[in-house]
Amino acid sequence: MLRSLSITNYALIDALQVEFDNGLNIITGETGAGKSILLGGLSLVLGSRADLSTIKDKNRKCIIEAVFEISAYNLQEFFNSEDLDYESVSIIRREILPSGKSRAFINDTPVTLSVLSSLGSKLVDIHSQHQTLQLTDNTYQFKILDLVAGSEDVLADYKKVLLNYYQEKKELEKLIDFQKKSNKEHDYNSFLLNELKEANLKEGMLEELEATYEELNNVEEIGEKLVFSIQLLNEDQIGVVNTLANLKATLNKLVSYGKQYEDLHNRINSILIDLNDASDEITNLQESLDANPILLGNVSEQLQKIYDLQKKHGVLEIGELLKIQEQLESTVFKTENLDVEIKEAQLSVLKLEEDLDHLAQQLHEKRVKVIPELIQYLEITLGELGMQNAEFKINLRAINSYLPNGKEDMEFLFSANKGTSFEELKKVASGGELSRIMLTIKSLLAKHTKLPTIMFDEIDTGVSGEVSNKMGDIMQKMSETMQVFTITHLPQVAAKGNVHYKVYKRDEEDTTTTNLKRLSEEERVFEIAEMLGGKDVSTSALQHAKQLLN
């Protein structure tokens, strides 16, 4: 329930703080006093779009705060899913800054407008002309029927399966489309894959092949250079090895003259050892060097294949070719195994269709069972609200497709007068008739489910006398299990309330402000008397007001 509402710097409201009770809360006031402003402020804190023009003082921010008792609404899951602190008494705040920016908070945690709106819809149901038009919407009509039928759990299961069904069917369609495209490309992909496999590609092989090719292709020049190197090293007169050996022998004669000569001799000896090793290696290379035109041809051919593959696939590295090979293997494998995958997907879709058919049948049976009860309640209650000839027909028609509400559509037909044909509500019901039908439906739903706080905005417009008295009785009955607000101009309705609030304007210097106050018993008598007889309250009007209140 709504415990309190605080509004600062909004429209004609400078500062307003009001506490509310459970039961039936009556709000009255003269036309233009600001009842719509009060509703606008409440709508803002529940998630409606902000309008900078609604700020009273453009230099200050507008703040609207509402305190709710929410323990009866099973909202813990919502708070957990939105990562919010759950409190049985929760505070919702909306701020509109002079810059036009808007901020929203739930229990002091910043939230988006969509989160605020989602929570707000679970806390307060503001009845307006727009909501009355919901009656003509097929989805809302199904919602009414399912609440009365107690089939919400079955419908929830149906919707879960339906979501899976849509996803599985979409995947199946993707597989079938992929198969159609892949079949056309399969031969070409297989050819590309085989071409890459035949190349026996490995990381680093290109560098090895290029090095081998360079050696084989330049074998004569390499041989000449190796022979010349051997000559330089080992020639009897000027060979480097012989010269270095003579140098070593000379220095050996100086070893006994000091440590420095011994070190120098050892260094020359080490160089000579390395040089002998190098000489042996050069000799081995020269002796093993052999022109091999067959091998050169094979290497050249293999290199050309790799170069051609790189050019074909637009890459420069062997690693990139290997990635392409891996992708082609996956595509070819998937294409060759699509029949099995599609078969499995089709079986999965068929199983989901069986589940949907079963749940849809359960929904249909529950709905059909309560239709007579729903029609009877509507017709009897509307008869008491001055629509004695109102009649309804609710027809369920099976269809061969899966809709959000099952495998059927619904005709919610209405006739207001004897001898008139049944038509859709939106075609034949007037605004006043729709309001009374909506009130009747809300009163029925209140018996079947825990509704949030509801606010009726002049739902009794256009009625009077006994009908208005009956409307008041309905709202009073609803208030036994929920918090009900009603903005009314009718004294018969106002007298039914547990608590009475008055919206009024007050002029202070050059400023007009809207205020709301809770009426005492004496003030309430006077307010209802004014509603009965106008500003000049007579004794008889006061007496009549007291009678209504008693």
Image (spheres, rainbow, N blue to C red):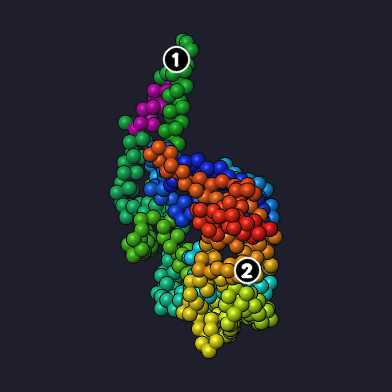
In this rendered view, identify the residue nearer to me: 197 or 382: 382
542 above or below 56? Answer: below
Residue 83 visible at all: no
The chief SS type of the magenta part is helix
Left or right of 30? Residue 511 is left
> Which quarter shows the C terminus?
bottom right
Left or right of 65? Residue 321 is left
Residue 346's image quarter?
Answer: bottom right
Residue 194's image quarter?
Answer: bottom left
Q: Which residue is mark 2?
A: 470
Residue 213's image quarter?
Answer: bottom left
Identity of the residue drawn at 61% across and 46% down: 19
Residue 289, how many percent across, how many down?
Answer: 38, 51
Q: Residue furthest front?
A: 539
Identity of the residue drawn at 35% across and 56% down: 316
526 above or below 281? Answer: below
The verdict on residue 127 being magenta is: no
Q: Which residue is mark 1?
A: 261
